[in-house]
Amino acid sequence: MHIDTRGRTDAYVGTFGLTESDQNELKQIRKMVTNLNKDLKEFGYHYRYYVKCQGRGPRRIGDRNYLHSLPLKYAKYMDAYIYRR
């Protein structure tokens, strides 16, 4: 996992690879958000949070290389964000 918060939104958590260790860390973050949502519901709050993964990697068009968001099945790595619903 890589964390670089320069020029990032406050919702940014980190950049995760497709390795098993990175996916386990992402799974722990999802579990943490699930537990937070349970507590929010128990205390009567009406908002919840969710984890969004945005696929990243090279997308080549002609002679140009772009680092864009991609569908997760084509991504080399992903950025994770926690958003409020």
Image (cartoon, rainbow, N blue to C red):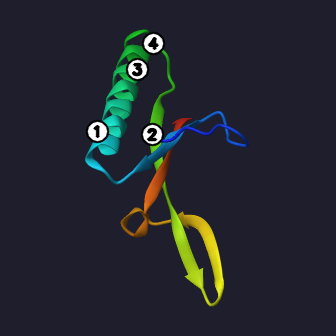
Sequence-first disc among 3 and 2: 3
At label 3, counting other C-alpha atoms closer than 10 Å, the crowd grade (few under 14, some 14-19, many 20 or more) is: some
Q: Nearer the viewer, mark 1 or mark 4?
A: 1
**In the rendered picture of this protein, how many numbered marks are placed on residues?**
4
Sequence-first disc among 3 and 1: 1
Q: Position of residue 84 (x, y in %)?
A: 55, 33
**Do the residues bearing badges 4 and 2 touch, measured as CB atoms within 8 Å?**
no
Q: Nearer the viewer, mark 1 or mark 2?
A: 1
In the displayed structure, does residue 57 sit left or right of residue 76? right
C-alpha gap between disc 1 and disc 4: 30 Å
For residue 44, the mark is 4
Sequence-first disc among 1 and 2: 1
C-alpha gap between disc 1 and disc 2: 14 Å
C-alpha gap between disc 3 and disc 1: 18 Å
Q: Give the SS element for disc 1.
A: helix
In the displayed structure, does residue 79 sit left or right of residue 64? left
Residue occupying the point 71% across, 39% down: 6
C-alpha gap between disc 3 and disc 2: 12 Å
Q: Position of residue 48 (x, y in %)?
A: 47, 28
For residue 36, the mark is 3
The quarter of the rendered structure image containing the N terminus is top left
